[in-house]
Image (cartoon, grey):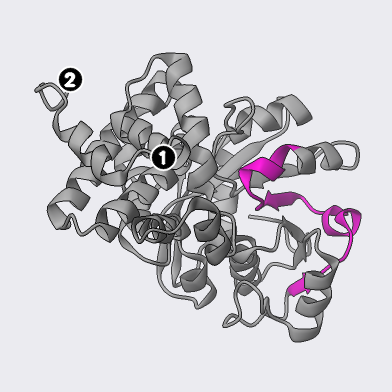
C-alpha cells in the first residue's frame, strides 16, 4: 500500500480516471487529479466534481485537483495514467524527464497503439525503459458505478507482484475488490479486443438479431481474444477471468458501454462520424478495430468476427452481410 502521507497521482480526468481518483481518495489516500484541459480542471476544482464526465460523483476531501503535471507527480510513489491509447505515448514522453526515479507507474489505458500495434506496456518500456515497476488496471467496470460506490471487482497485473498487491490494497474497500495477476499481456489484450467485439454486439442487437446471436458473438469473440492473446504470450486462463470474459460480457451487454452504443447507432443507419459525434467521448473500439486487425495479421491469427467488424467500419460492409459471412464459414470443431 502507498505509504502514509505519500500522495498518489492520477493523470487523466475522463470518466474512468476521475472514478479511480475518487476510489483512491475514498480509501484514505491523498490523491491528485490532473488533466490537460485547463477549463475542465478549473471547473472540477470549483465544483468538487467532474460535471462533464461524472457529474453524480462528488469528490472526497482527500482528492485534490492540480493544474500542472509536475505538481501532480511531485513526491508521488504511485502514478496512474488514465488516458486513451492514442494519447499514451505522448504523455509518457512528457513524464520521462520529470518522473522520480523510484516512482511506480500504472495505467488504465486499453488498446493497442494504432500506428505500431504495441500494447501499453510495450509503449511504456520504449519511453521509460524496463527497470521501472509497471502495472495495468482492467476489468468489468463502468466509471459511473465506481463513482457511485457500487460493488465492483477488477484485475491489476504488474511486472512485480508486490506492486500489484500494493495497488489492490490501495483501491480495495467494502464495495471495491481488486484481484492481482502477473499476466500483463493477457490483461491488456483482453482490454484491447473487447471494445471491438462490443461494437459488433451493438450492431447485432441494433439489427434485431436476438439473444442467440449476441451470446454466439460473445462466446466466439472470447475464442478470438484468447487466440490472439496466447499468440502474444498471454496465459490462457487470464481470458476466463475479470479482464477477459468479465469485461467482454459487460461491454457487450450494457448500454453504458460507449462501444456498444456506437454499434447500436450504426445499426440505426447513422454514419460513423455522426455516431462518434453523438457519443461525445472516445470510442476505443473504432480505432481498436484497425489495431487488432494489424496485430492479428502480423501474427497470423484468424479472427473472423473482428475482421468483419473492421470491414463494416472501414470498408462499408453492410452489417447484415457480416452475419451471413460468419454463418457460412466452413464447419469445424469448436475448439480448434
Is residue 13 part of the magenta span, yes or no? no
* Residue 303 badge: none
Is residue 69 part of the magenta span, yes or no? yes
Quarter-of-image position of residue 312? top left
Quarter-of-image position of residue 319? top left
Quarter-of-image position of residue 126? top right
Could you tell me residue 42's position as x and y percent? 84, 76
Vertical order, 36 against 98 (above or below): below
Judging by the rendered image, the residue that carries numbered circle 1 is: 316
Could you tell me residue 70's position as x and y percent? 90, 53
Classify mark 1: helix, strand or loop: loop
First along the sequence among labels 1 and 2? 1
* Between 282 and 141, the one nearer to me in the picture: 282
Quarter of the image containing the N terminus? bottom right
Please identify, in this view, whether the residue under mark 1 or under mark 2 is nearer the observer: 1
* Residue at 68 percent of width and 76 percent of height: 50
* Residue 10 in view (yes/no): yes
Label 1 environment density (alpha carbons within 10 Å; few <14, some 14–19, many ≥20):
few
* Residue at 74 percent of width and 68 percent of height: 30
Query: Gap in Å between the C-alphas at discs 1 and 2?
Result: 30 Å
* Residue at 50 percent of width and 72 percent of height: 144
* Residue 242 in view (yes/no): no
Q: Is residue 33 left or right of residue 180?
A: right
Residue extent of the magenta highlight: 63-89
* Residue at 65 percent of width and 63 percent of height: 14
* Residue 336 badge: 2
Label 2 environment density (alpha carbons within 10 Å; few <14, some 14–19, many ≥20):
few
Could you tell me residue 88's position as x and y percent? 70, 42
Vertical order, 244 against 114 (above or below): below
Q: Is residue 52 left or right of residue 145?
A: right
Amino acid at each position: 500500500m502507498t505509504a502514509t502521507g505519500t500522495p498518489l497521482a492520477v493523470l487523466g480526468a475522463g470518466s474512468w480516471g476521475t472514478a479511480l481518483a475518487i476510489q483512491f481518495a475514498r480509501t484514505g489516500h491523498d490523491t491528485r487529479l490532473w488533466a490537460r484541459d485547463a477549463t475542465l480542471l478549473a471547473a472540477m476544482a470549483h465544483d468538487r466534481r467532474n460535471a462533464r464526465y461524472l457529474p453524480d460523483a462528488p469528490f472526497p476531501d482527500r482528492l485534490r485537483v492540480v493544474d500542472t503535471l509536475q505538481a501532480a507527480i511531485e513526491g508521488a510513489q504511485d502514478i496512474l495514467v488514465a488516458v486513451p491509447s492514442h494519447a499514451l505515448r505522448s504523455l509518457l514522453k512528457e513524464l520521462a524527464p520529470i518522473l522520480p526515479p523510484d516512482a511506480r507507474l500504472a495505467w488504465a489505458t486499453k488498446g493497442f497503439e494504432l500506428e505500431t500495434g504495441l500494447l501499453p506496456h510495450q509503449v511504456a518500456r520504449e519511453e521509460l525503459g524496463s527497470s521501472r515497476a509497471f502495472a495495468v488496471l482492467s476489468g468489468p467496470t463502468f466509471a459511473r458505478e465506481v463513482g457511485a460506490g457500487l460493488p465492483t471487482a477488477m484485475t491489476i497485473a504488474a511486472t512485480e507482484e508486490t506492486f500489484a498487491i500494493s495497488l489492490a490494497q490501495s483501491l480495495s474497500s467494502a464495495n471495491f475488490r481488486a484481484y492481482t495477476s502477473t499476466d500483463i499481456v493477457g490483461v491488456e489484450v483482453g482490454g484491447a479486443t473487447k471494445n471491438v467485439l462490443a461494437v459488433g454486439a451493438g450492431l447485432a442487437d441494433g439489427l434485431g438479431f436476438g439473444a442467440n446471436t449476441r451470446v454466439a458473438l460473445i462466446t466466439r469473440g472470447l475464442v478470438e481474444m484468447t487466440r490472439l492473446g496466447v499468440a502474444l504470450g498471454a496465459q490462457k486462463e487470464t481470458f476466463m477471468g475479470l479482464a477477459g470474459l468479465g469485461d467482454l460480457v459487460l461491454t457487450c451487454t450494457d448500454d453504458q458501454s460507449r462501444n456498444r452504443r456506437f454499434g447500436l447507432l450504426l445499426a440505426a443507419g447513422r454514419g460513423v462520424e455522426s455516431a462518434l459525434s453523438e457519443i461525445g467521448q472516445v470510442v476505443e473500439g473504432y480505432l481498436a478495430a484497425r489495431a487488432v486487425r494489424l496485430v492479428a495479421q502480423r501474427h497470423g491469427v484468424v479472427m473472423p468476427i473482428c475482421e468483419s467488424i473492421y470491414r463494416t467500419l472501414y470498408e462499408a460492409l453492410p452489417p447484415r452481410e457480416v452475419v451471413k459471412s460468419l454463418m457460412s464459414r466452413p464447419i469445424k470443431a469448436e475448439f480448434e
